[in-house]
Image (spheres, rainbow, N blue to C red):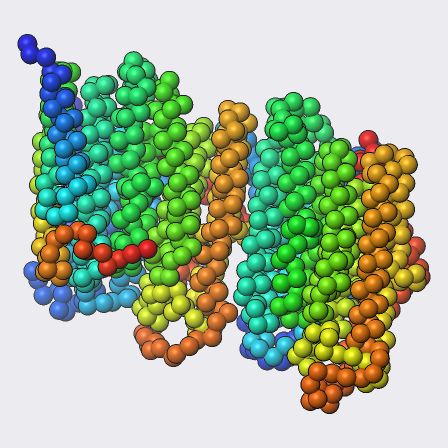
Amino acid sequence: MMSLEPFLYLAGFMFAIGFAVLVIKRNAIFMLVGLELMLNAVNLNFVVFSKMHGTVEGQVVAVFVIVIAACEVAVGLAIILNIYKHFKNIDHHSINELKG
Amino acid sequence: MNWLTILIFLPILSALVVGLLPTGAYLKKINIAVAGLQLVVFSWMAIGFSTDVPTSSEYSEASFQFVERANWFELGLGANNSLDVDYFVAVDGISFSLIGLSIVILIIAAVSSLSIQKNIKGYVVLFLLLNGAIIGCFAALDLFLFYLFFEFMLLPMYFLIGIWGGPRREYASIKFFLYTLLGSILILIVLIALYSSSYVPTGVEGVYSHSLNLIDLSKAANYHVEGLLHAEQSGTLLGLTWRHWAFVLVFIGFGIKLPMFPFHTWLPDAHVEAPTPISVILAGILLKVGGYGLIRMGYMLFPSEANDLAWWVALMGVISIIYGGLNALGSNDLKKLIAYSSVGHMGFVLLGLASATSEGVLGATYQMISHGLISPMLFLVSGVLYDRTHNREINNYSGLASKMKLLTVAAVVAFFASLGLPMFSGFVAELLTLLGSFKSGATNGLLPHWMPVVATFGIVISAAYALWTIQRMFFGPFSVKEQSWSDQLYDLTSREKFMLFSLAGLILFLGVFPSFLIDMLDQSVAQLLILMQN
Amino acid sequence: MELKNLLENQIVLLKDFLPVGVMALGLVVLLMSELTALKTRYPNAFAWIFIVFFSVGPLFVEPLSVLEAKGSFNILLSLSALVFGLQNWSLTDKSRQNSEYYALVGSIFIGAYVLLNTSHFLVAIIGLELMSIPAYLLTCWNTKKSSYEAGLKYFIYGGFSTAVLLYGVSWWYGATGFLELGSIEVLVVALNQSSTPFVLMTAGCIVIGLAYKIAAFPMHFWSPDAYQEAPTPVVGLFAVVPKIAGFVFLEKLTLVLMGTTHWQSVQKIYLLLAVLSLLLGNLAALKQNKAKRMMAYSSIAHTGFMLFPLLHASESNLSYFHFYLVLYAFMNMALFLFLDYYERKFDVSSLVDFKGLGSKSVFMGVLLLILLISLTGLPPTGGFIAKLLIFTGMYEGLVQSGDLIFLFILILAGINTVIALFYYLKIPYFMFMKKEAVVKKINPKSFLVVNFLGFILVFLITVSFFMPTWLMGIINNVNFVQ
């Protein structure tokens, strides 16, 4: 059987990339993509551990996380759409009316 | 019902009633009436007050009079602990005389408040709440209750300065509040350490409780062996035991209130901005709460630690005396001068307490009463001038004696009393304090001789500024800064005569017949000294 | 026989789901009634539907245990729903007369209920998301430019913290093989086999994820913006409901972690979060000029305060923690009720707008003053007892562990009380000490219900000073860790 470790490294790598995208990118859509990447890294982790422990719980979580991610994206896009309507762009550096 | 309880709750209940009444000038008379009624109750109590309470090796309920004790709540803390808080009020000589002083000052302040015009209802309600909190603070023997009243004084005071005060009232009131709150947080930390360390038998075999009862806490046997404040606890922090630290915190906490150098800076601001009646209360009573708290929570609970640190306590006292005196000498604002003179005079309280001799401690308590009468009188004098001209600059006045004879008499009496001339109460207090601190150097060796010597020099400074102020303002040829003032400067009204001369009478009485007050204080001071000298 | 067993099991299951079922039914009823003519005929009907389902729903947990005062946080939830419903009912506003508003809020309640009553990570995550996603939308409710901005910020932080939390949970699952926090001993054994840096990373991820819900230091940035932009009654919920639920779950996590050998290091995370939340919350609140924004920072500072007992989670310290949590809930419910009142009646949003309002409504002014005193933690209010207990807990930590860090906390918390006073006093300062500059329009509507609710809440807060025993009695009877 193939070792499971590489998958964990891959997941960690994906999480790091997602995080980097979230922090570096100024475009709100890209930030959303970063979030998705992070959540998918989590899914990979859960599935791998589920296989490792031989329990099904991890896979159940993964399914739920997919649902959660879908909900978040739906709401997130709705907000971004309205942001575009009001600010005429989605660069989060230029969205800074609230301060303090 | 206990008389003390009536004294505390009469003003608080009146405040609630006044809150429901329609506003109007008559409320100010209700305010006076309440304080007057308290005086009647107090006089009745004074007749029954025994000056001959036997002292014993430690405090017990028998050391106090007018005891009322009822269970308030027992808060379960975790599995086997509970915090027992009692409604426990009682007085000994020290607190009884301070309550007497408070009531007198409150009457004077209430009379002086008749000139308040703005938002009368709010003023009277806050005044009455302050009244109740002050009496409660002096009467409480449960630390929780004490702390409740101690904190409860802050808020009415904050609004009384902040709404009815002078031009910089907002700054002064918030500064007053923050300083005092900082002090009370330090006290709160000690309070927590005290009740967590205490381990008082409840009477039932094997059941102990955490107590905040001052009498219980003053006995070494009532502390848990592992508690930080147990007398034989070996742990130290920066070379001082936890009990020493507790005393330091209490000392700073009440020192802010006292006020003691370098925590005094709120006082000149608060005094200058407060309306006259509130200055009177602030100088006459609230500063004494600091001294009283130091006696109750510092010296009664940590007597040996206090003696270990006596040198520092006295040092702060001496610095306050000199620093306050020099600042007063340099002040041009009359109220500021009086405020700094308060810093100096309250320094004697610290010096006297630190000496741990019967003269010194007696002098310290005597000084609290005496200063509680003298500085309100000085503030009233400055209030009279301020009412006329809305100006308090010493340089703007000269030769007032020719126009305002009675005011000059009152001012001279007040300043002479303040500089400690014989025949006035300040003389007795400061003489006793200095005697005590000289004796301390010779007997128990707590204080070096130079301290009372320097403090004596402080008296010289206070003589300098008092005489100089009188000479500048009241004597010499009449001149005021603006011509229009000279018409406004009429002599005392009958209300002002009442306030000033009744205070003057009391000051003279206590100066000529000191034994009247000393009898009252003597047993309580002796009881405190038994603890301190062990 | 087998069938009977199966049925009984099903009934037990059903009973557990009953509260969620009632609340979910509430959601359906709310959304369905939008289709009927209810809205035009009875504009307030939604508020009543909300009250019926959501203030009763949480109490359906083993109905008897409610009488025994168990599960008091569920009662708190129900109380919060009641206050919210009445508040919205009495302050009728066009934008709040529709079912989505109540349905979204209802979803927050379901999420909070789920999070409060579970010790399973998966269920907890569902609960967290049930609270978060409607919260993003509610933040944008006023459909202004700035509210979308607040919503976006809230969303980004929310999504990020969810991802971090989930990542931590995935490693936790990998290390222990369990997603259930109930069996502490098993988990402790499993965690003790892992290395300290690993546990630190895992616990750190989870704690930081939860820090978002309780608005603690590194994840607090959303809260001032969201508090400022969301409708005020909803802000009252943000400050109370998710925070309680998040804290209770954090407590369950802490009980596992403190048993492990890594606790010494994990404790540092808590310490950092607590100290920085307290300092940053209080210092940032000092320079705010918007009332709701200031209160957001004050709420962050309170979070810091509530994290302290978790540093030394002894039995007594946990009961202090619960006491503070309950009082915090009361105080914040009341606080935003008052802010909403002033916003509706006098059009107040900045602190300066409070000028001279003390004489306009003396009753509410004095109540608000008492409330702010309680938030500062001065007697004679329940806030003082709560703060006293936290201080006591820190003192016990100092004595029992001999760790001087607790002394440091004690002093820091003391200083922060003074700082807090400074900004809390700003409101009464403007209300009572300043004269009104311009006569602004006053909403002539009667606010009797809000006055009454405010009075009841402030009364409860004051009573818990004079009789702290009743509240402590209830709290000590609750079994929090199921």
At 77% from the left and 53% from the top, the residue drawn is B322
At 33% from the left and 65% from the top, the residue drawn is C349
- For residue A68, say whether it is visible: no
| Relative to B448, C138 lies left or right | left
Q: Is residue C445 above or below residue B403?
A: above
At 39% from the left and 46% from the top, the residue drawn is C280
Q: Is residue A16 above or below residue C229?
A: above
Q: Quadrant of residue C289?
A: bottom left
Q: Position of residue C362 (x, y in %)?
A: 47, 70
Q: Position of residue B499 (x, y in %)?
A: 78, 73
Query: Between residues B196 and B82, which one lies in front from this camera angle?
Result: B196
Q: Position of residue A73 (x, y in %)?
A: 10, 44
Q: Which image quadrant: the N terminus of chain A? A: top left
At 74% from the left and 49% from the top, the residue drawn is B319
- For residue C194, say whether it is visible: yes
Q: Is residue C26 above or below residue B385?
A: above
| Relative to B349, C367 lies left or right | left
Q: Position of residue B128 (x, y in %)?
A: 64, 65
- How many numbered marks appear? 0
| Relative to C424, B28 lies left or right | right
Q: Which image quadrant: the C terminus of chain A? A: bottom left
